[in-house]
Image (cartoon, rainbow, N blue to C red):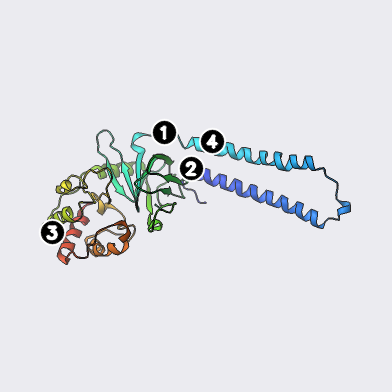
């Protein structure tokens, strides 16, 4: 009920129209009911059934529901026109995280980010939603309505934010035991800031700069590379690189994110990552992350140093 984008504004208008219309009809029915109960029957005017049924059962619903139908259909059409290429984004629902894929534009390279959808404020973007496995439903209440996410078809959803801001998105269809944690962030930025972010994300990962980070990179390839990818590095030989469907998020620029582990930490630095590595097993046990608590302290520190370096 606090819309921050035009689609959410349309939905709020429909909601308020229905709310006040419903209140008015409820009030009318109550007045009639009190009239019937408390008015002396001898003094009530005699009303014939047929005109009453025609007026209350046919004319009134037509009068109230027809404008609502037209408004709803018009809003639906307004939100299905195509958008610019840069602003077509593929979203894949996994158990239990969202993979957001920005397309290749003029050969500048495609890239992915997990659990985070960036978009330019004031311009509509079009999401192409599909699932990998079970059904989900994407919902950013401040910006748009829900859209079901199926494994065997692609659903389209246009969303737009009026102004820069950070909005919460979630999965609105029960999809398994960690459904309630399947949240994502929508970050609307000023258009030039968004373009700078696009360019930075299209860059390959930073090469390791210290011995510790190099050791971390090797560990990443052996311990994490089966599920995660880091673009254009030695890790490229891992089996997860370039897969259309990967079990874990792309970590090429993990340190440029605002959160770690769906909000487990709000700042990504080597200390936080090192602490989180053995702990995530407890929080992410249902998503099939392997147990990393067997990693010794120095290995953990090396891995964390490498990941925190990937800005
Ligand atoms: Cu995905 Cu609920």
Q: Secondary structure at mark 2?
A: helix
Marks 1 and 4 sit apart, C-alpha to C-alpha, by: 16 Å
Q: Which mark is residue 82?
A: 1
Q: Are marks 3 and 4 in contact (CB under 8 Å)?
A: no
Q: Secondary structure at mark 3?
A: helix
Marks 3 and 2 sit apart, C-alpha to C-alpha, by: 49 Å
Say few, some or many: other residues with alpha carbon within 10 Å of mark 3 (under 14 / 14 to 19 / 20 or more): some
Q: Position of residue 186 (x, y in %)?
A: 38, 49
Q: Earlier in the sequence, mark 3 or mark 4?
A: 4
Residue at the image position 32 percent from the left and 59 percent from the top? 286
Marks 3 and 4 sit apart, C-alpha to C-alpha, by: 59 Å
The residue that label 4 is drawn on is 74
Q: Are marks 3 and 2 in contact (CB under 8 Å)?
A: no
Q: Earlier in the sequence, mark 1 or mark 4?
A: 4
The residue that label 2 is drawn on is 7
Q: Which mark is residue 212?
A: 3
Marks 4 and 2 sit apart, C-alpha to C-alpha, by: 12 Å
């Amino acid at each position: 009920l606090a819309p921050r984008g035009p689609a959410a504004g349309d939905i709020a208008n429909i909601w308020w129209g229905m709310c006040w219309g419903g209140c008015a009809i409820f009030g009318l029915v109550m007045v009639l009911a009190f009239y019937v109960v408390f008015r002396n029957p001898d003094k009530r005017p005699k009303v014939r059934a047929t005109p009453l049924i025609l007026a209350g059962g046919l004319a009134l619903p037509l009068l109230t529901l027809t404008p609502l139908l037209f408004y709803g259909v018009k809003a639906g059409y307004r939100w299905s026109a195509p958008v610019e290429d840069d602003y077509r984004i593929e979203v894949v629902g996994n158990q239990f995280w969202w993979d957001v894929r920005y397309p290749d534009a003029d050969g500048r390279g495609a890239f992915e980010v997990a659990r985070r959808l960036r978009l330019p404020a004031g311009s509509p973007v079009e999401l192409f939603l599909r699932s990998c496995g079970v059904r989900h439903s994407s919902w950013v209440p401040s910006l748009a309505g829900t859209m079901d996410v199926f494994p065997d078809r692609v659903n389209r959803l246009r969303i737009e934010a009026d102004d820069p801001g950070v909005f919460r998105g979630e999965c609105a269809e029960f999809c398994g035991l960690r459904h309630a944690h399947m949240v994502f962030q929508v970050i609307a930025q000023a258009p030039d800031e968004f373009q700078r972010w696009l360019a930075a994300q299209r860059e390959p990962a930073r090469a390791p700069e210290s011995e510790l980070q190099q050791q971390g990179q090797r560990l990443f390839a052996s311990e994490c590379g089966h599920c995660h990818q880091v673009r254009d590095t030695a890790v490229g030989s891992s089996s997860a690189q370039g897969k259309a469907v990967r079990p874990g998020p792309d970590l090429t620029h993990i340190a440029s994110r605002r959160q770690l582990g769906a909000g487990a930490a709000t700042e990504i630095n080597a200390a936080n990552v090192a602490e989180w590595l053995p702990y995530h097993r407890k929080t992410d046990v249902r998503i099939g992350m392997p147990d990393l608590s067997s990693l010794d302290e120095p290995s953990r520190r090396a891995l964390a140093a490498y990941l925190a370096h990937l800005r």
